[in-house]
Amino acid sequence: MVLQSIDNKLSLIERDGQFFLMHGHAVLMDTIHTSSEKTMANLCCIDIGKNARILIGGLGFGYTLKQVLDIAPDDAIVYVAEINKDIINWNLSVLYMINGHCLNDHRVIVINDDVQNILKSKKFDYILMDTDNGSNNIIAYDTNAKIYSPSGIKAFKDVLNKNGRIAYWGIADDLNLLKNLMKEYDRIEEFKVDSYNYHSLSRYSILIAQK
């Protein structure tokens, strides 16, 4: 099975029961290596409490969202910004049994928009950025490049509540992003996460900054 997004930027491929989100010939994500998204949620939201307000940049296959919902209290609100309408529709159809059912959770508000446009009127305790493969790898949409720039990092920091955290997922070390984060934050941690399947090992990077 192959599905193409309306803007022709992304395609969803199913092979032997596994799904792959492609940008051209490059894999953006799959349903094989998923532990790093879960780890990012656990690390970023480690002290989550009542009335938490959470923003997730990028829906993807919903693994970050699923883990956030597993640890978030019943009165939390989780905003999910997804720029590509087809990804939302795929989660509500062919990906429903993966994690698409999470979109029906009463705590979830899905917004079909650039995550940067969500910053204008809300404040958050936790922000989890899973929009690309990092600033030095595949960037699916040109506007996403600003997310990792000094001005973009400042914009996200400005909407974090006191002691709030923001996490950035990457497919590899991202020294450029780390350098830009150090201009705004004093408290930054980097984690290396191994993700295994039956025949391969992948290592991902998670950067977490605290206001």
Image: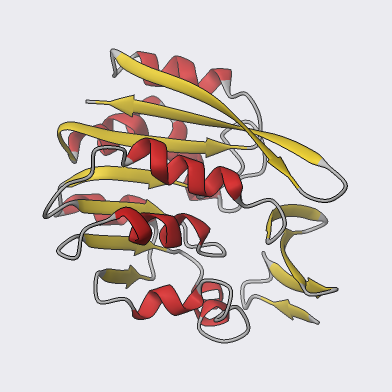
Q: Is residue 54 above or below residue 42?
A: below
Q: Is residue 19 found left or right of 149 in the rendered image?
A: right
Q: Is residue 211 above or below residue 99?
A: above
Q: At which x and y percent is residue 19?
A: 73, 69
Q: Is residue 119 found left or right of 32 in the rendered image?
A: left
Residue at the location (52% across, 82% down)? 89
Residue at the location (43% across, 56% down)? 67
Q: Nearer the viewer, residue 31 or 22?
A: 31
Quadrant holding the N terminus? bottom right
Residue at the location (34% across, 14% down)? 183
Q: Nearer the viewer, residue 148 or 173?
A: 173
Location of residue 30 (image quadrant):
bottom right
Q: Nearer the viewer, residue 109 or 35?
A: 35
Q: At which x and y percent is residue 180?
A: 42, 19
Residue at the location (49% across, 42% down)? 39
Quadrant holding the C terminus? top left
Q: At which x and y percent is residue 49?
A: 16, 47
Q: At which x and y percent is residue 87?
A: 55, 72
Q: Is residue 194 above or below residue 71?
A: above
Q: Nearer the viewer, residue 149 or 48?
A: 48
